[in-house]
Image: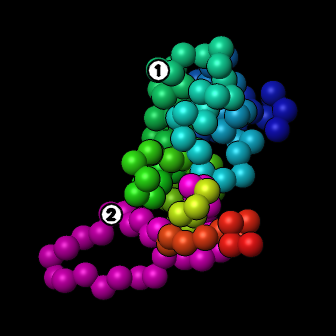
Amino acid sequence: MNYELDIEHLQEHGIKPTAVRILVWKECSSFHKAFTLQDMEERLPQMDRSSIFRALRLFTEHHLLHEIDDGTGFQKYCVCRCVDDHHLNHIHFSCRKCGRTYCLEEYAIPLVSLPEGYQMEDAEYVVKGLCPSCKE
């Protein structure tokens, strides 16, 4: 994405495009797997941790990112491809060897029938194992 497209994308999601937010979004959108706050800190060493964290929280609230709890103890983020502000309910794969987490967007979370009186608001589905690179 170029600079103007980044600004437009943030504005389309109701986010004021500050210099920090544009830089953080540019890095977020360059990841092809889930990433952590620490990953972002390594890519943006000139920026303080709290500024990066605030941008990630804002992007999550405005559906640019979704959060993944893959059981590693680190909050992970993935660029969200939402429809009408609803997250696509897809499976995530967490590799036990390399620690990477992948969005498997083409695989939907299976529907779960809940007992009467329960109302689902969100679902996470993480499959754990070895990714193709680690399996070899």
Q: CA distance from mark 1 to mark 2?
A: 29 Å
Which residue lies at the image location 47% right of the left edge and 50% below the top edge?
Answer: 67
Q: Is residue 134 left or right of residue 57?
A: right
**Which mark identifies residue 22?**
none
Q: Earlier in the sequence, mark 1 or mark 2?
A: 1
Residue 30 lies in quadrant: top right
Mark 1: amino acid: Ser
Q: Can you give x and y, in whole percent of width and height, for residue 55 in the image? A: 53, 28
Observer-side mark, 1 or 2, equals: 1
**Which mark identifies residue 121?**
2
Number of marks? 2
User: In the displayed structure, would residue 120 be above or below residue 110?
Assistant: above
Q: Residue furthest left?
A: 117
The residue at which mark 1 appears reads as 50
Mark 2: amino acid: Glu
User: In the displayed structure, would residue 9 be above or below residue 83?
Assistant: above
Q: Can you give x and y, in whole percent of width and height, for residue 135 in the image? A: 68, 72
Asked whether the viewer can see residue 71, the reply is: yes
Q: Can you give x and y, in whole percent of width and height, for residue 116 in the image? A: 16, 82
Q: Nearer the viewer, residue 69 or 112?
A: 69
Which residue lies at the image location 49% right of the left edge and 59% below the top edge?
Answer: 86
Q: Residues within 10 Å of mark 1 (few under 14, many from 20)?
A: few
Q: Can you give x and y, in whole percent of width and height, for residue 29 in the image? A: 71, 42
Q: Secondary structure of the magenta portion, mostly?
A: loop
Q: Which residues are magenta?
A: 99-126
- At mark 2, the secondary structure is loop
